[in-house]
Image (tube, helix red, strand yellow):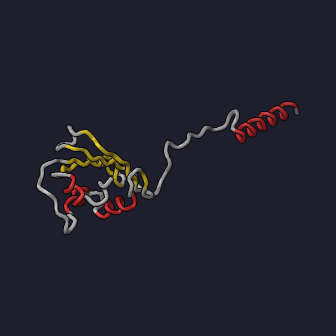
Amino acid sequence: MRFRLKVLGTAAAITVGCLTGVGGGVAHADSAGTKSLYAPSALVLTVGKGSDAATTTVERAVVLNCAPKPSGTHPAAGTACAEVRSVNGRFQQLVTDAAPGMMCTRIWDPVVVTADGVWKGQRVSWQHTFANSCTMNKSGGSVFAF
């Protein structure tokens, strides 16, 4: 009888320990990150004077997050995300569309824009040199208007 009470007492102690997380319970590790239905889309956009991103000093930079909803430090995140989404993250297609009726001088004062980060889960590292800030504003849409 005494042996039976000791076994029951030990079993009760283990059960209580498992329920309260003390003693012989199983440890569970928390997941490293949150799970999302959306592939990450977070970019750092920069603008700088010069002809090459490697040697240019960045004058302005913003963060553009597009999934699950537009956010970041970009002043027009919703519009910028819509423009990037419309070209499926192919930034070069953004600079080929020129604003109709806008005229720019042909002065060479180069401006470099870059986009680095992740678009729909894919790594992005892109740069483009405009002849001057007017041509950047003419063809860059709202993505680089910050």
| Above/below status of 54 relative to 122 | above
Where in the figure is residue 52, as x and y percent of width and height? 18, 42
Where in the figure is residue 127, as x and y percent of width and height? 22, 48
Q: Nearer the viewer, residue 10 or 145?
A: 145
Q: Nearer the viewer, residue 5 or 24?
A: 24
> Dividing the picture into quarters, in which one does residue 53 lie?
top left
Q: Nearer the viewer, residue 61 or 132?
A: 132
Q: Residue at x 21, y 58 (%)?
A: 95
The answer to whether residue 41 is left or right of residue 108 is right
Which residue extends farthest bottom?
101
Which residue extends farthest right?
1
> Dividing the picture into quarters, in which one does residue 23 lie?
top right
Q: How many marks?
A: 0
Q: In the picture, which quadrant includes the N terminus? A: top right
Q: Residue at x 16, y 63 (%)?
A: 103
Q: Residue at x 78, y 33 (%)?
A: 10
Q: Residue at x 49, y 51 (%)?
A: 35
> Dividing the picture into quarters, in which one does residue 86 lie?
bottom left
| Above/below status of 80 relative to 16 | below
The answer to whether residue 120 is left or right of residue 87 is right
Where in the figure is residue 8, as x and y percent of width and height? 81, 37
| Above/below status of 5 relative to 107 | above
